[in-house]
Image (cartoon, coloured by chain):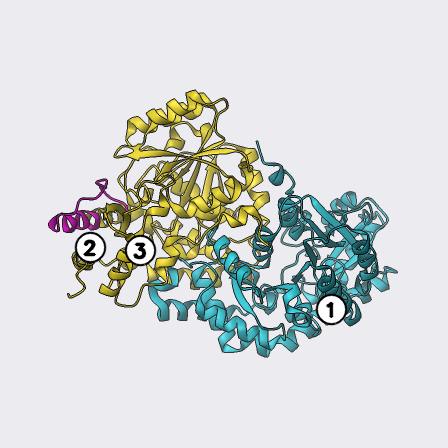
Chain colours: A cyan, B yellow
């Protein structure tokens, strides 16, 4: 019944685990931001103001590509975050942006390179459009550009796209080093492929130079307000120097018109107020301190993650055990994580799990790790 | 640079015309509902209540398939509108729903049949996925099922899908007769193709029996809150008896997660309040009376539309002139319409235009037609 493309799209382990989380589960699974940092009062006010100021216009069709009000504010946001200049196309979150870029650029037989491990949910978009994915390993400096270069030298034709999460990588937590960033964009320029720089964690991580600003014509930048403001608004964006691509993305947005008008106006209002810009330092510090506590808590139980993240949401832990059974024990003990095997596109990482400091209350991290340790020790008697 | 699929997706004439509309233009172009009917006060209250009641949860990731709160309310909505029962999958508007259904079911060489004329913007979704579209003409009873049947008899294999807007058809304004509806689902059942019933105008049109309720296993129903509540929320939905399809649509929604969490909760709250259910009669009467006035105004200038709609938003007018030049004159005279040639998938309809009674204030319809007549008479001296 289904197309071969649709058959390649699977329910993500994150969605699977979400269904297991109860009220009292310590959530080390999700990629949502900390609920305590979502500016509820300001969001509520912004909705009231938008309805008053724009009236029915706030509820008209959004059209394709984003409202002028939001595009203007996102230009400023790109400037604040030193992302680099270019045309801004608004999307319904970063995942939607990546799907649209793939829909524009990736045919069934086109090759794309991605990190291994990589974010399982964006892989759904790539897998829908093309069967020709090639994983390149990540180490504690980011993607192994030496291995990538050797592969590129051996290829008859360049890949079409390379997908990377260079900052606070999902799921490894690694931030790509300056040297690797430089090497990566050099390779893109030399071999003629386009990098998709998926950068949702930039606003909450230590400043780095974007791949995009280093070589704008070789990179399509994908940003998001999900981590710094709120994912439920569904506001993401693409930045590109390629006018034809920006226009084609707008054409493709006609296939869903999915970016809510009222939410665009609310996001524009919040950006215009400077609220989140003024809190960037606080956001970074908050997640870095949660990550520090996570690593400390793991260390106290003799657990060492695969990589040592400095900030962001995620770290990987090799459990050396059957992860699905571990998950069931862990959920019974009141803690949830995400099995990481589906983030790997070779046979490695099968016993790894992804731990997140995103949504969990900081004070619960030590007890979360404690419960995880009990599950690891197969000791359900608390 | 772009994939062949993406190359087939063009900017719609509706988007093109939207860019020409000024503050003082009488808008006979758009497919938005009447701004005076958007319950602004209730929407504003609903946002305030949702933020208070759900707190940060209102701004988490939506997950795939829709929040339980909204799915439950949409089941009731389907019952109120006698759509028929089945699994409900929430989407980011009906356009998004149709794209997801195509992404699940339509491969490049699969044939789909559609009405001629048909809604140009949904055609973008079909054209993205497959090159094998086949138009079947519409008359004042809806799609010509006799022609369809002859084609089906002559085919070696059935088409995969048939796309129809059976009620208040876009752009013709025709509502399919009972007899044609019956014949159409019989053909789907006999020849083994799936009907996509795109039914956004149902809540604002005279009651009809859905194709879906007549033969649920042969039809995928696509509904929307855009016309009865507000398009800017981006809430649509699919109803299907096919569990595997419902699950696959949820898988595919992971490719964008584009249905805003807070908007889903707001829509659920408004549906739960019974507000729009209690206004359905009023909505129908409002648009029917606007359509009546449009037809009357056209008649006063000796203009007769191609079909005689009873309600809904649209009618078609054959201008027997160069439509693009007419549009420029019309916009200068302060009225906008949509050139309809791109709604036709053969060489017919090239001088037709689509007129809408959706967003325009009722009192402006006669003057809109007056300005249109001046443009038609090539008389720019008002």
**Mark 3 or 1, closer to the camera:** 3
Chain of the residue under label 1: A
Q: Is residue A224 magenta?
A: no
**Residue A266 location (% of width, % of height):** 46, 67
- Side of B102 relative to A282 (left or right): left
Relative to B14, does residue B127 appear above or below in the rendering?
above
Residue placed under numbered mark 3 in the picture: B324
Tell me residue A202's x, y (percent): 66, 69
Which label belongs to residue B376?
2
Between the residue at mark 3 and the residue at mark 2, the CA separation in whole angstroms equals 12 Å
> Are the residues tagged 1 and 2 within 8 Å (C-beta)?
no
User: Which residue has dot 1 on it?
Assistant: A311
In which image quadrant can residue A291 be found? bottom right
**Residue B307 on the magenta segment:** yes
Left or right, A14 with respect to B151, comes to: right
Occupied quadrant, residue A117: bottom right
**Badge 1: how crowded within 10 Å, few (<14), some, or many (20+)?**
many
Q: Nearer the viewer, residue B233 or B48?
A: B233
Quadrant containing the N terminus of chain B in the rendered view: bottom right
Residue B55 in view of the camera = no
Neighbourhood count class around disc 3 (C-alpha, 10 Å): few under 14, some 14–19, many 20 upward: few
Q: Position of residue A345 (x, y in %)?
A: 76, 47
B117 or A135: nearer the viewer: B117
Magenta extent: B290-312
Distance between the alpha carbons at the discs numbered 3 and 1: 56 Å
> Residue sitting at 37 percent across and 63 percent down?
B19
Question: Residue at coordinates 83% horizontally, 56% vertically from top-left?
Answer: A150
Dot 1: element: loop
Judge whether A374 appears above or below A325 on screen.
Answer: below
Judging from the image, mark 3 belongs to the subunit labelled: B
- B61 vs B323, left or right, is right
In the displayed structure, B65 sits above or below B166; it is below
């Amino acid at each position: 019944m289904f197309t071969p493309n649709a058959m390649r799209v699977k329910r993500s382990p994150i969605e699977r685990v979400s269904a297991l989380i109860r009220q009292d589960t310590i959530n080390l699974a999700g990629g949502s931001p900390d609920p305590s940092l979502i500016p509820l009062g300001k969001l509520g006010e912004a909705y009231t103001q938008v309805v008053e100021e724009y009236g029915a216009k706030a509820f008209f069709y959004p059209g394709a590509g984003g409202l002028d009000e939001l595009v203007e504010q996102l230009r400023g946001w790109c400037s604040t975050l030193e992302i680099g200049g270019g045309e801004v196309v608004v999307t319904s979150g970063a995942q939607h942006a990546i799907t649209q870029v793939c829909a524009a650029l990736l045919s069934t037989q086109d090759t794309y390179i991605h990190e291994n491990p990589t974010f399982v949910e964006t892989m759904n978009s790539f897998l829908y459009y093309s069967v020709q994915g090639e994983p390149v390993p990540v180490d504690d400096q980011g993607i192994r550009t030496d291995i990538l270069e050797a592969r590129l030298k051996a290829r008859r034709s360049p890949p079409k796209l390379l997908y990377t999460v260079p900052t606070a990588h999902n799921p490894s937590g690694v931030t790509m080093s300056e040297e690797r960033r430089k090497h990566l964009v050099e390779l893109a320029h030399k071999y003629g492929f386009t990098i998709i720089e998926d950068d949702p964690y930039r606003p909450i991580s230590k400043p780095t130079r974007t791949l995009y600003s280093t070589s704008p014509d070789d990179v399509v930048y994908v940003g998001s307000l999900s981590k710094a403001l709120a994912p439920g608004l569904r506001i993401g964006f693409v930045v590109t120097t390629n006018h034809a691509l920006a226009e084609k993305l707008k054409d493709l947005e006609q296939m869903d018109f999915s970016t809510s008008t009222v939410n665009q106006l609310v996001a524009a209002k919040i950006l215009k107020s400077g609220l989140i810009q003024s809190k960037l330092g606080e956001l970074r510090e908050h997640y870095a301190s949660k990550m520090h506590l996570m690593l400390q808590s793991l260390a106290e139980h003799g657990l060492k993650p695969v990589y040592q993240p400095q900030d962001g949401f995620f770290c990987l832990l090799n459990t050396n055990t059957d992860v699905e059974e571990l998950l069931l024990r862990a959920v019974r003990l009141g803690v949830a994580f995400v099995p990481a095997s589906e983030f790997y596109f070779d046979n490695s990482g099968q016993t790894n799990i992804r731990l997140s400091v995103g949504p969990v209350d900081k004070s619960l991290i030590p007890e979360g790790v404690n419960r995880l340790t009990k599950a690891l020790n197969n000791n359900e008697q608390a």
